[in-house]
Image (cartoon, helix red, strand yellow):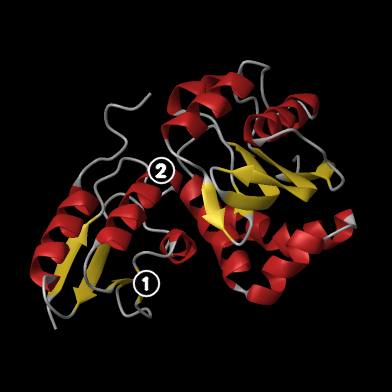
Amino acid sequence: MPTRTATVGSASGLHARPAKIFVEAAAKAPVKVTIRVGDRKPVPAKSMLSVLALGAKQGTEVVLEAEGDGADEALDSLAELLATDLDAGHV
Amino acid sequence: MSELLDRRAVRLGEKTDGRDGAIRRCGEVLVEIGAAEPGYIDAMLAREQSISTYVGEGVAIPHGTLAGKDLVKRDALAVLRFPETVDWDGEPVTVCVAIAAKGDGHVELLAALAEVLLDENQARELREATDPDTVIRLLGSIQEEVEQ
């Protein structure tokens, strides 16, 4: 299964706004994407509550997985989004 | 040490005319319990305009912008329940868990709240709560997790 590992780049972790931006992008992907931290259970990347419950901080490594047509492209862009500091430029 | 969720900050019979009105009420309660300066209310409204704080299960988590952190006097939560539900950009919201947080440490707090809401029964109990004790029991675990 196509997999990507990304390190959370947002300065204050996957808190409300960065999580929402990520979840909205995942919901638009043509394939079902899951996200997990370490050996914990993969959860749907488009579920805001599931993503918040990961408690991922800046520097936390997360694993994204998806299967089907367009999975690689979707994972590439989501992994890039996670690695970006989504807090930067916001006051 | 003061509690993260003060009983005085649990308001279960709120009424409002819409999303912004609900956010103002949340901010007023945070100001009233001494957790934030009045200017924090505008920071909460600004934050909501940049991206919705709706998280699911009929719950929104209004909080200030990063710039609004200076207006926070102490970390605190307020729980406001709107039995008639509020139209939150198309999502029906019954409960607002308003957050005043000084530092960056609210990832743990949000994770703990999300765990509660991922449990269907606990989420329903929170939406239907008419007794502050129910809310404090459901969200008390948040306090413990944040203090660890």
Q: Quadrant of residue B21?
A: top right
Tell me which label, 1 or 2, sits earlier in the chain: 2
Residue A60 in view in this figure:
no
Residue at horizontal 56 percent and vertical 67 percent from the top: B115
Judged left or right of residue A70, residue A47 is: right
**Residue B82 location (% of width, % of height):** 78, 46
Kindly identify which residue carries mark 2. A17
Rendered image: mark on residue A44: 1
On the image, the x and y values in percent for residue B101 come to 57, 36
Using the rendered image, report if marks 1 and 2 lie on a common chain: yes
Identify the image quadrant of the N terminus of chain B: top right
The image position of residue A13, as x and y in percent, is 36, 48
Q: Residue at x 27, y 31 (%)?
A: A88
Q: Position of residue B10 (x, y in %)?
A: 82, 45
In the rendered structure, the residue with mark 2 lies on which chain? A
Q: Decide: few, some or many residues near mark 1? Use Cα within 10 Å; few <14, some 14-19, many ≥20.
A: some
| Residue type of the residue flagged with mark 2 | Arg
Name the residue nearer the viewer: A1 or B22: B22
Secondary structure category for the residue under label 2: helix
Left or right position of B48 against B5: left
Q: Please, what secondary structure does the residue beneath circle 1 have? A: strand
